[in-house]
Image (tube, rainbow, N blue to C red):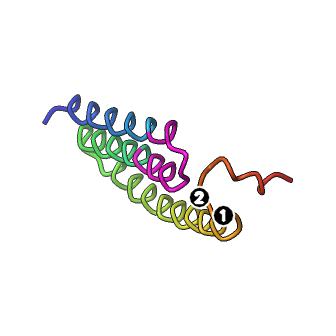
Amino acid sequence: MPLSAYLALAALVFSIGLFGVITRRNTVGILLGIELMLNAVNINFVAFSRFHGTAVGMIFTLFAICITVAEVALGLALVILLFRMRRTATADHIDWLKG
């Protein structure tokens, strides 16, 4: 497959994730959109790594996946805390984070 096919796939996945972040009101849906956007970046890393014939992009992808796992764990912990305090998981009710 040519590089442009991978880049088109990454652009499509990123666009779907951005659409999900913009249109969702549920915090879990917003987190899923962010995950799609991060996976699009990982697709780009791997595609350029394969295109240049080095393993640097794949190493960056492994680090990005590790950071993504930590981000998901922290985000879901915040969503669970929000649900326990407000009995809703809607992003409009996150005013308790204000100082």
Give, as a three-letter code, the residue at label 2: Ala
Residue 91 x/y as whole percent: 62, 49
Left-right relation of 22 to 99: left
> On the rendered image, what quadrant is the N terminus found in?
top left
The one nearer the camera, 78 or 39, is 78
Q: Residue at x 50, y 56 (%)?
A: 28
Q: Are marks 1 and 2 in contact (CB under 8 Å)?
A: yes
The one nearer the camera, 72 or 65, is 72
State how many labels appear.
2
Residue marked by disc 1: 82
Question: Magenta stretch: residue 22 in it?
Answer: yes
> Are there few (<14), some (14-19), or many (20+) residues within 10 Å of tag 1?
many
Look at the picture and state if 91 lies above or below 18.
Answer: below
Q: Residue at x 39, y 37 (%)?
A: 14
Q: Residue at x 31, y 51 (%)?
A: 55
Residue 89 numbered mark, or none? 2
Give, as a three-letter code, the residue at label 1: Leu
Left-right relation of 13 to 93: left
Residue 84 x/y as whole percent: 66, 71
Question: Magenta stretch: residue 66 in it?
Answer: no
Magenta part of the chain: 20-36
Look at the picture and state if 96 lies above or below 19.
Answer: below
Predominant SS of the magenta segment = helix
Left-right relation of 82 to 23: right
Q: Quadrant of residue 43?
A: top left
Q: Secondary structure at mark 1?
A: helix
Residue 30 x/y as whole percent: 51, 48
